[in-house]
Image: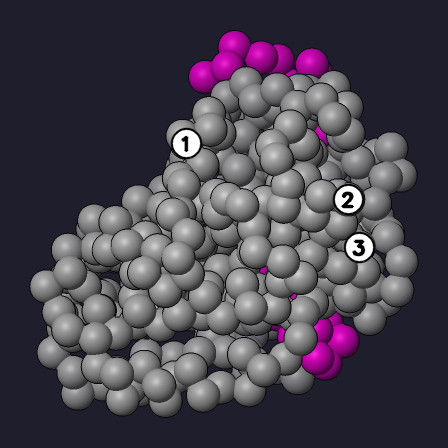
Amino acid sequence: MLAIGLMSGTSLDGIDAALIETDGDANVRPIAFRGEPYSDAARAQLAAATALALTFDRPRASPDLVAAGELIDRTHAMAVHKLLRDAGIEASDVGVIGYHGQTVAHRPDRGWTWQIGDGAVLARATGIPVVSDLRSVDVAAGGQGAPLLPVYHAALTAALPKPVAVLNLGGVGNITFVGADQRLIAFDTGPANGLIDSWVEAESGARFDADGALAAAGRVDETVLTAMLDHPYFDLPPPKSLDRNDFTIQPARGLSPADGAATLTAFTAASVADALSHLPERPRRLIVAGGGRHNPTLLAMIAARTGLTPEPSDALGWNGDAMEAEGFAYMAVRRLNDLPISFPGTTGVPQAMTGGVVSHP
């Protein structure tokens, strides 16, 4: 069927909307993709909502969070309509939307994860069935609720020699290992672009380090880097997951803008190297998706620390910007077909399980 996937990541840069045709199994055909950036006002509102949510001991109603949720619903509905227009597709031809929503807090250690965005509202606004809240069932069963993309990574890499690894460098990094026996192992590696973006915005007002230029001009402070790597998260065995705010830029305070960027970029690269040490065997290839694949300084540091050559996913004909959105479209179809989207090796659930709430127009 035709399916739309929607993803709004922790970087708060905007909405990714993808249209694919899939059976939720081996067949996947990307059709269209659209990126819809958030306005500065929307980014500020969502950042404030996230900061507020992190102060709560559990998800609960709050005027600011309700308003942020309405913003998410409104902007995602607009993204769907624009994507359909671009693709020349009628809403009635689309079988389902996979609606990730916006993560404002992720606390599987406390038994909850919180994505704002109402699937029922989006279904009414688009006239298309919606699968939303894809992480909560996994967390309720004792899983990490993340990462969820491995099932889609497995479909994309089906024809590639194994073992292979797919590294997603978004706000938080995560890696998927697909073994020769199709065994899936996945977990969050650490901050990817999140800390770098926060540093650059604080130091210059820019949203990210374009082409890694600022980091390339700096020097890595090994003392700060060593201190940041001395974090208990890196000693935990997978599966494991992070909230973007589990790490901060505070250790780099006092460094020059360039040295801070270099050190935080090196921290991301070092966390990827650490992640490879948790895998049962060395992957033959390391395929990189997400915004971080556009940062040559980061990719060079990953290569130096891992001994592998990071391959941007675009080189394989995949749209690295669309992959997460495509993945949630794929998972929505799997939910309709009662197929699993998370597994013991990816989130730590006791058994493979599906997830998500289905809302009809």
Pointer 1 residue? 314
324 relative to 270, above or below: above
At which x and y percent is residue 16?
Answer: 48, 39
Instruction: State the extent of the magenta-drawn residues as a range.
Output: 86-114
What amino acid is at disc 3? Phe
Pointer 3 residue? 343
Pointer 2 residue? 181
Q: Earlier in the sequence, mark 1 or mark 3?
A: 1
At which x and y percent is residue 209?
Answer: 22, 57
Figure quadrant of the C terminus: top right
At which x and y percent is residue 274?
Answer: 49, 71
At which x and y percent is residue 123?
Answer: 70, 35
Q: Residue at x 67, y 62 (%)?
A: 280
SS for dot 2: loop
Image quadrant in which you'd find residue 258: bottom left
What amino acid is at disc 1? Asp
**Nearer to us: label 3 or label 2:** 2
Q: Which of 336 and 225 is in front in this view?
A: 225
